Image: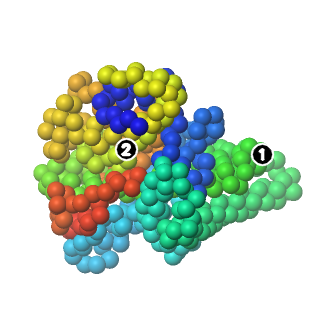
Amino acid sequence: MVFIRHPDDLKVILNTKSKHIDRGIFYDAFCPWLGKGIFTSTASKWQNRRKMLSSTFGPLILKQFNEIFIKEGENITNSLKKTEGSVTKDLIPFISEHMLNAICETAMGTSLQEMDPMYQQYQQAVSRMTQICMYRTLRLWLHNDWIFSLTAKGREQKRLLKILHEFSNKIIAQRKVYHKDKEQYFRNLNKDEVAVDAETIMQKERPNLLDTLIFESQNGFLTDSDIRDEVNSFIFGGYDTTAIAISFTLSLLAEHGDIQDRVRNEIDVSMKDTEGKLTESSLQNLKYLEGCIQESMRLYPPAPLIARVTSEKAQLKSYLIPPGTITILSIYALHHDSNFWPNPELFNPDRFTEKNNQIHSYSYIPFSAGKRNCLGQNFALREMKIIISTLIHNFYLKPVDLLEETQLEVDMLLHPITLRRVTFIPIAKS
């Protein structure tokens, strides 16, 4: 096993010409939960799934999601305004609930309002399951994974898997009913001699991720188990990571009032001509907010470590490593390396808003890089901009718990194990 952190070495492993796409044993522990979906699959299976699903996060589809993201931002705002005056929240559990609904409504076409309180159980199960998966990785490493099923953690995993799989199965079942009802509607039109091709019309609606999976299964390319694996993978990858990134960004803005004011001014100016509404054009103008999000993800990358297995010999700066080597890529260490980031612990969004040709292309990779980079990164950035801009437009943020006093841990994702509380103070609107 080799740990690497220099961007030149990361480029060797991650660049688009690289054949090192398998993730190895650290991801195998997630297979009981995520199956062999795009998160854990290898070689040709991963390539086929990636090609199949890439279109579901294209620019035109992402624009369709604006309305849902804006609605979710308004839901967060309204929940905070239910209590008159200031409200203090522990950010990650508070934000996570809304991000889970956002990923389900956009990528899955299903509102969680119909599944309450099931989604609360799901949130708790995800949090615990990631911890168990990391523990199980040690068992896999020691080649005695069969003992794991006999332990208390093994029995807990079985119970959690039931919750997680029931949740995804219900989402899939609801979307299949939607398609069945829609097809019946088109058949009824045809009975009235209206020439309608149901599938063509549904395709013109720009199918979301789950729609695409269902279409592929109807054509015989995917099984029901394949669909569930992808649904589990994208919900896990699309809500918890985003909630963590939003929470750290809000915490940083709360602690840096001058930067927060600058962000708010940019948002207010951008929304001035649209009567306080976010639009596609106003989102494009939020360059400083985007810089704040990027700087936050530099300081606190949600996925601080990733792994690859070399498929052939790889020449690093100082070493030649053989095929079959597990390489651990430390994104967190890379993002805090003073050789590439002056004053690396300083929150400075201008690193990204000012043109800087000195930044190494592989010194900033919060969404990984190369062939196996995050498929939903543009989805996540759009969602973060909308949610954060809505909150900053409506509230002043004041810190309760300081980041320098926050204890962090990694169980695949980087997150605080102590409270991350921020006070939201409503802004009086004229």
The N terminus, quarter of image: top left
Residue 230 place in picture, x, y as percent: 59, 51
Tell me, yes or no, if residue 274 can be seen here: no
Q: Quick one: label 2, few (<14), some, or many (20+) residues within 10 Å?
A: many
Q: Residue at x 37, y 30 (%)?
A: 10
The C terminus, quarter of image: bottom left
The residue where tag 2 is placed is 305
Is 111 left, or right, of 81 in this rendering?
A: right
Q: Is residue 95 above or below residue 66?
A: below
Residue 21 place in picture, x, y as percent: 51, 33
Q: Is residue 339 above or below residue 121?
A: above
Is 117 left, or right, of 365 in this rendering?
A: right
Q: Residue at x 51, y 76 (%)?
A: 117
Is 401 left, or right, of 127 in this rendering?
A: left
Front position among marks 2 and 1:
2
Q: Nearer the viewer, residue 247 or 409?
A: 409
Is 290 left, or right, of 342 in this rendering?
A: right
Q: Which mark is residue 220?
A: 1
* Callout 2 secondary element: strand
* Callout 1 secondary element: loop
Residue type at numbered disc 2 = Leu
Q: Residue at x 51, y 41 (%)?
A: 24
Q: Nearer the viewer, residue 357 or 145?
A: 145
Residue type at numbered disc 1 = Gly
Q: Nearer the viewer, residue 352 or 229?
A: 229
